[in-house]
């Protein structure tokens, strides 16, 4: 039996939409507003998140990079980020010339620690990028209060949290800019893709130019921009996926609940939802001793258990920071994500449970 950690839930509708794009030969466009399917996807995302505007780009990394450009973050600025995340968060900061300052996380849900955040702020701090990791929701109330006190901007890295909400308000909407990813493994995919949501018209207009070489009407570059456009082919997939999102989230939630019931008797830390939060269950992440041994035993049985961020960003060779982040180090050595994507069946979940019980009994 093979149970991958994540598989895109692609159906006939996505195939037909891509086929239409190919037949129309409308693969992409340099128009400021984007192509027809890009615009349709943006409308769906804006409506779903309750945002006034959505701006599609070609990756989650591009979304972060464009957001940093839009806020004029540059050389000499410091941006506070968690180290326990995919390295794209740090790379986006470096790509605009700024310095990432690594902040520790909370053991309860692997998101940025407000207490450690306070300690890391300096006179060079310009922005905070909290990451809603694994689909968990960062402590945005506390982070927002800190940001206001120090006059800092916030960019939410919501790459993994589309569909996660706090008191019925969607992640990515608790700041001026929220960034999403539509990578192949995400809850909504475009193959590769990303998007930024905002309620500010001025930021929307800047972001449209940034994704298109700073142009407004073609060959009239008005600011620094890059080719960050989302092709129509990718938007075609994302558009259909957005319509399926409620159904996809229900399947993830069902699978997570089944695993919670099956694994409650084990001596491991199970993922939980705090009061007011509805998690999208992008990743179902447990914490356990002897993680690497357990992961290998599950992998040997065909279960795609995976330790995401076993090397946190600050310990990669490129960053090689001596930041003291004890909870990050603990999480990096103990977390293990199990498959709960929409194509996982109840039989799969029982198989995962039996394998995990056997692995932990040794």
Image: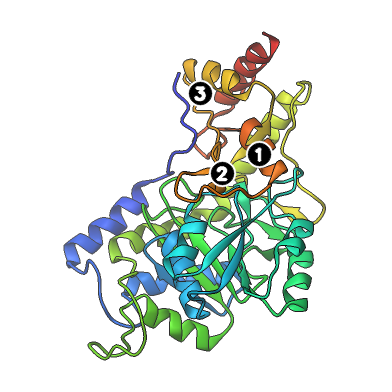
* Residue assigned mark 2: 312
* Residue assigned mark 3: 303
Disc 1 is placed on an element classified as helix
Image position of 194 with respect to 186: above or below: below
The foreground one among 102 and 171 is 102
The foreground one among 136 and 87 is 87
Is residue 184 visible in the rendered image? The answer is yes
Query: In the image as oriented, which residue stretches furthest toward the top?
Result: 362
Q: CA distance from mark 2 to mark 3?
A: 23 Å
Q: Where does the image place residue 198, in percent across and percent down from the top left?
A: 56, 77
In primary-sequence order, the first of circles 3 and 1 is 3
Instruction: Tell me which residue sits at (67%, 30%) in the image.
Output: 259
* Residue assigned mark 1: 329
Instruction: Tell me which residue sits at (76%, 64%) in the image.
Output: 118
Instruction: Tell me which residue sits at (59%, 55%) in the image.
Output: 161
Image position of 169 with respect to 288: above or below: below
Q: Residues within 10 Å of mark 2 (few under 14, many from 20)?
A: many
């Amino acid at each position: 039996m093979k149970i991958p950690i994540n598989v895109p839930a692609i159906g006939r509708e996505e195939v037909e939409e891509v086929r239409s794009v190919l037949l129309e030969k409308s693969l992409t466009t340099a128009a400021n507003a984007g192509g027809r399917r890009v615009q349709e996807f943006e409308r769906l995302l804006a409506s779903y998140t309750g945002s006034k505007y959505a701006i599609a780009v070609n990756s989650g990394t591009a979304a972060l990079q464009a957001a940093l450009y839009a806020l004029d973050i540059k050389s000499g600025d410091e941006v506070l980020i968690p180290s326990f995340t995919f390295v794209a968060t740090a790379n986006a900061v470096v790509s605009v010339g700024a310095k990432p300052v690594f902040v520790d996380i909370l053991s309860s849900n692997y998101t940025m620690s407000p207490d450690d955040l306070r300690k890391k702020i300096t006179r060079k701090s310009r922005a905070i990028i909290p990451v809603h990791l694994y689909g968990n929701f960062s402590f945005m109330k506390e982070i927002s209060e800190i940001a206001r006190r120090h006059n800092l901007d916030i960019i939410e890295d919501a790459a993994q949290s589309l569909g996660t909400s706090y008191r019925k308000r969607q992640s990515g909407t608790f700041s001026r800019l929220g960034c999403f990813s539509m990578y192949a493994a995400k809850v909504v995919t475009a193959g590769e893709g990303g998007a930024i949501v905002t309620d500010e018209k001025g930021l929307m207009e800047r972001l449209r130019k940034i994704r298109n070489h700073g142009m407004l009407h073609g060959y009239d570059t008005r600011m620094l921009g890059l080719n960050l456009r989302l092709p129509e082919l990718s938007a075609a997939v994302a558009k259909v996926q957005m319509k399926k999102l409620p159904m996809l989230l229900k399947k993830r939630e069902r699978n997570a609940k089944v695993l919670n019931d099956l694994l409650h008797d084990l001596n491991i830390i199970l993922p939980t939802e705090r009061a007011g939060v509805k998690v999208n269950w992008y990743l179902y992440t447990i914490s356990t001793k002897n993680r690497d041994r357990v992961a290998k035993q599950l992998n040997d049985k065909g279960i795609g258990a995976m330790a995401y961020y076993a090397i946190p960003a600050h310990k990669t060779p490129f960053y090689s920071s001596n930041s003291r982040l004890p909870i990050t180090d603990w999480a990096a050595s103990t977390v293990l994500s199990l498959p709960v994507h929409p194509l996982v069946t109840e039989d799969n979940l029982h198989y995962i449970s039996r394998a995990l019980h056997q692995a932990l009994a040794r």
